[in-house]
Image (cartoon, grey):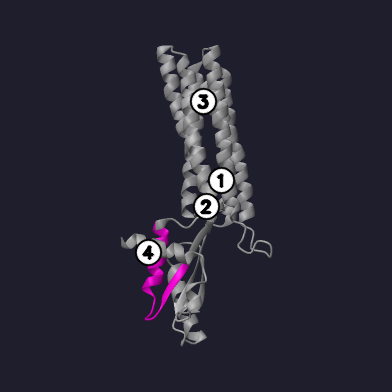
Amino acid sequence: MTPRRLESVVLLSIAAALVTLALKFLSYYLTGSVSLLSDALESIINLIAATAAYLSLRYSAMPVDDSHTYGHEKIEFFSSGLEGVLILIAAVLIAVLAVQRLITGGKPDELAAGMSILLVASAINGGIAQILLHYGRKHQSIVLEADGRHLMTDVWTSVGVLAGLSLVWLTGWTQLDSIIALLVAANILWTGYDLMRRSFNGLMDHALPPEELAKVREAIETHLGPGMTYHALRTRQAGSHRFVDFHLLVPGRYTVRHAHSLSEVIETAVRATLLNLEVTVHIEPIEEPASWQDSALLPVEEAARREQNR
């Protein structure tokens, strides 16, 4: 799917956020339920987050230039981190409103109508969330995946609100309305924390996940010839693109052409392991002492090997 098509998916999310926002505030207007208000407030965050996702996708699709030689895709981590912050703010607002209602009291009205409207809004969010998650995972887009997960959090929030309000309706225990809102806030806090953690890791050039790193190592090691090894393997991800670089140590008698041909074979094998992978290989003579002292990663790798051999 082209960047333009991915942007159209996010535009669908923005449209859904506008519709569900209107429906949820209508349900709150009819009922006065603080748990429905908390759900409506989260939809405001949905709208802001979807808009930020759209803008970041447009920016990340820009080609490399002399100021951004690795591209612009790290903006996706910033966008998902912003979404995490907004989710946390929504959780705090919901908790404050719930505590205020517990203190002041109040009884929700017209619950049947409000719950029916919320059910329609939840169905819309659920459908859009699955679309976002599908394309986010398929195209390795943290922006789409973050937006989809946020919407699914909203769906489960609404399910909890509906279940709780059903109990309020059946039992007449109005304090349950505020308790539901507090539970909603706790669930939202966890989602916001997880998004912020993933975004922080991306912005700090966190290494690829262990299972992906294992595939990269296997591809390299499978194609090493006699008298060859490698070290200083570094990996990172920016948006949907992954980057791998390492030092390939070959016998010093090899010609530049021969060493380059070997590195091309290894690069091709590594690129075949993962989507959107860019590989950089630095060739060095294996007999040269300086080749074993040219990276701060070497002590780290040696410590890891000792740990594995225990």
Is residue 297 at all visible to an observer of this figure?
Answer: yes
Q: Which mark is residue 42?
A: none
Q: Amino acid at mark 4?
A: Arg
Q: Is residue 115 above or below residue 239?
A: above
Q: Is residue 306 magenta?
A: no
Give x and y (percent) for residue 5: 57, 53
Give x and y (percent) for residue 118: 50, 27
Give the residue number, with chain letter if any, for mark 1. 80
Could you tell me which secondary element the residue under label 4 belongs to? helix
Task: Indicate which disc, 3 or 2, sits on the residue closer to the N terminus.
Answer: 3
Spatial distance from mark 3 to mark 2, Cα to Cα? 32 Å
Q: Mark 4 and mark 3 in contact (Cβ < 8 Å)?
A: no
Task: Indicate which disc, 1 or 3, sits on the residue closer to the N terminus.
Answer: 1
Q: Which residues are magenta?
A: 211-232
Q: Mark 1 and mark 4 in contact (Cβ < 8 Å)?
A: no
Spatial distance from mark 1 to mark 3, Cα to Cα? 29 Å
Is residue 33 at all visible to an observer of this figure?
Answer: no
Q: Is residue 142 above or below residue 101?
A: below
Spatial distance from mark 1 to mark 2, Cα to Cα? 10 Å
Q: Nearer the viewer, mark 3 or mark 4?
A: 4
Give x and y (percent) for residue 126: 47, 37
Q: Amino acid at mark 1?
A: Ser
Q: Nearer the viewer, mark 1 or mark 2?
A: 1
Q: Amino acid at mark 2?
A: Ser
Give the residue number, with chain letter if any, for mark 2. 141
Give the residue number, with chain letter if any, for mark 3. 117
Spatial distance from mark 3 to mark 4, Cα to Cα? 59 Å
